[in-house]
Image (cartoon, grey):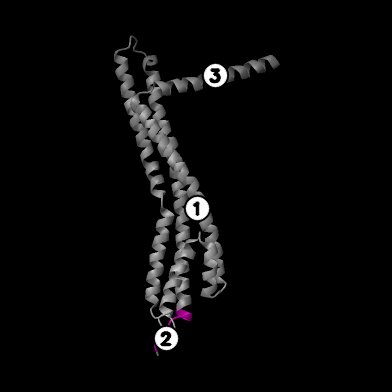
Amino acid sequence: MLGGFVCFNLALFQSTVSQESSLSSLLLRASPIAKGVLLLLILFSVISWAIIFAKWSMLKRAERATDDFLERFRRGKKLSDLYMDSESHKHSPLARVFLAGYDEIGSQMNEGANGVRSIESVARVLQSATIDQVTQLERSLAWLATTANASPFIGLFGTVVGIIIAFQGLSGATGSSIQAVAPGIAEALIATAAGIATAVPAAIFYNLFLNRVKTIIASTDRFTLELLNFVERNYVKLNV
């Protein structure tokens, strides 16, 4: 019984090795166009995974810093205290938006006024800073969207070209059975599999990151409104 188990595992191992070697031989015999398609998909995949790891880390830091900074703001701290806190929350888009608004508030108050003269001016500065932070958060997401949309078609292109080459070779073959074109078709279908394997992670993480960015943007918009209300209640100069 033990001998049969060993023979079964040995046969399974040999079968796996044989499949790997046959796959390697298919790739080595691939046409220049198929190899070019595979190299292009590998390039797309490598860049996409680099973006995924970098964006995951960046968004995680931004979410943590944003939640902490927003909690400190809602405790009712003074703007000067929040300014000091913002230095330790540089990964938070909220902190950077706050710094832009704080500079505008300080600029207006340093002009000799008893308070903020134009709340609309502060609102415009906050809006501009928010747009800058949204652009930063969405950076590189376009590459993931492009990879998710284009990779299947690139793989399909390689498959179509490979099948055309396989059937062209059939005309010069001595036999017309499926065995004559099977290697060429198998080689061509590898391009489709590679295209799907490249597109699926890019699509999944693009949608995941987009939702997380939208959540941060929503928090930033709420923070901007709360900050404007706070400034209007405490710092706006009354014209009486």
The residue type indicated by label 2 comes to: Leu
Residue at the spot 31% in from the left edge and 22% down from the top edge: 165
Considering the numbered disc 2 on the image, is that residue within a helix, a strand or a loop?
Answer: loop
Residue that label 1 marks: 58
Vertical order, 227 against 66 (above or below)? below
Distance between mark 3 and mark 1 Cα atoms:
44 Å
The residue type indicated by label 1 comes to: Met
In the picture, residue 27 is in which quadrant? top left
Q: Nearer the viewer, residue 176 or 165?
A: 165
Q: Nearer the viewer, mark 3 or mark 1?
A: 1
Distance between mark 1 and mark 2 Cα atoms:
42 Å
Q: Which residues are magenta?
A: 232-239
Percent from the top left, x then y, of residue 212? 48, 54
The residue type indicated by label 3 comes to: Ser
Position of 51 with respect to 161 (left or right) is right
Contact between marks 3 and 1 (CB within 8 A): the answer is: no
Percent from the top left, x then y, of residue 104? 41, 73
